[in-house]
């Protein structure tokens, strides 16, 4: 096995580890989620520190160690400064990464997930209007769920398989999709525009999602169902 290897990684978080070191959690294109140790990263003189801050996209050289893998060198490609100067955006990114960390296991390689996270940071960083942060956070959760293989069925009824008509449907989070008006036993319905919103999130990239304008009731309807779906599958 080689002593060193290079990865492209998104820094998810960084914690104090031993006196002067940091323990850095990353999601890398090549190896998925990894914990790495950055020696001396807490010292003022560290040249590396700025390149391994949370939410940076960085090229890292990793040195294999006996107990830990170490960061031997780091160069940041994009530090998303517009994101870091906005508390609302920072909160969305922080909460998204907490969920990501919770449901992704170490060393499960998925380059598409890496690009999804990068697109998410880029779009979040670029938004310059007042952001519907709750919707954007839940859009991330839904797209993450889809990427992990739990894409909800939003076009045909999960019971009779017929096409979904706009009205009187129900989102059955246990069955993983919409139930049509004929099959629906539950009295709760999902608004046709909330269905549209869910479909849009699943289909479109974060840049397009960031341009969305839906009224509060519609976006809350979609968010409620994303939460139920997430909790059922991952909690
Ligand atoms: Zn049906």
Image (cartoon, rainbow, N blue to C red):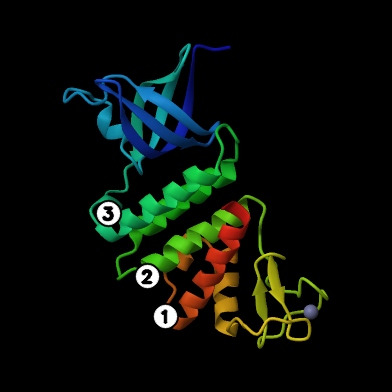
Residue, far left: 44
Q: Give me the residue at 46% from left, 52% from top.
A: 119
99 sits to left or right of 23: right
Residues under labels 3 and 1: Cα distance? 26 Å
Which of 175/112 is in front? Answer: 175
Specify which label sits upstream in the sequence, 2 or 3: 3
Specify which label sits upstream in the sequence, 3 or 1: 3
Task: Name the residue tied to disc 1.
Answer: 216
Other-residue count near label 1 (Cα within 10 Å), few / some / many at <14 / 14–19 / ≥20: few
Residues under labels 2 and 3: Cα distance? 16 Å
Mark 1: secondary structure: helix
Q: Give me the residue at 24% from left, 21% from top.
A: 20
Between disc 2 and disc 3, the foreground one is: 2
Say which quarter of the image contains residue 104.
Answer: top right
Task: Say whether marks 2 and 3 touch (CB < 8 Å).
Answer: no
Mark 3: secondary structure: helix
Say which quarter of the image contains residue 131.
Answer: bottom left
In the image, residue 103 above or below residue 220: above
Other-residue count near label 3 (Cα within 10 Å), few / some / many at <14 / 14–19 / ≥20: some
Specify which label sits upstream in the sequence, 2 or 1: 2
63 sits to left or right of 131: right
Q: Give me the residue at 38% from left, 23% from top.
A: 37
Task: Name the residue tied to disc 2.
Answer: 132
Task: Say whether marks 2 and 1 touch (CB < 8 Å).
Answer: no
Task: Name the residue tied to disc 3.
Answer: 82
In the image, residue 106 above or below residue 180: above
Give residue 2's position: percent from left, percent from top.
Answer: 54, 12
In terms of image quarters, where does ligand 1 lie? bottom right
User: Mark 1 CB in 8 Å range of ligand 1?
Assistant: no
Quadrant where the N terminus is found in the figure: top right
Which of 81/55 is in front? Answer: 55
């Amino acid at each position: 096995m080689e002593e060193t290897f290079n990865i492209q990684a998104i820094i998810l978080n960084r914690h104090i580890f031993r006196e002067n070191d940091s323990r850095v959690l990353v999601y890398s294109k090549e190896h998925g989620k990894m914990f790495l140790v950055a020696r001396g990263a807490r010292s003022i003189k560290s040249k590396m520190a700025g390149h391994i801050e949370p939410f940076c996209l960085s090229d890292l050289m990793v040195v294999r160690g006996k107990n830990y893998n170490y960061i031997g060198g780091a160069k940041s490609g994009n530090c998303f400064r517009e994101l870091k100067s906005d508390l609302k955006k920072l909160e969305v990114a922080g909460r998204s990464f907490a969920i990501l960390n919770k449901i992704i296991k170490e060393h499960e390689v998925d380059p598409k997930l890496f690009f999804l996270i990068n697109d998410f940071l880029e779009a979040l960083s670029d938004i310059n209007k007042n952001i519907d942060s709750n919707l954007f956070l839940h859009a991330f959760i839904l797209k993450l769920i889809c990427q992990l293989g739990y894409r909800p069925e939003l076009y045909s009824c999960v019971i009779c398989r017929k096409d979904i008509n706009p009205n009187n449907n129900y989102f059955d989070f246990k069955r993983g999709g919409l139930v049509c008006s004929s099959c629906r036993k539950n009295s709760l319905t999902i608004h046709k525009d909330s269905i549209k919103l869910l479909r849009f999130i699943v289909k479109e990239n974060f840049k397009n999602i960031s341009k969305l304008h839906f009224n509060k009731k519609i976006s809350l309807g979609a968010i409620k169902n994303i939460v139920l779906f997430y909790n059922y599958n991952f909690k």
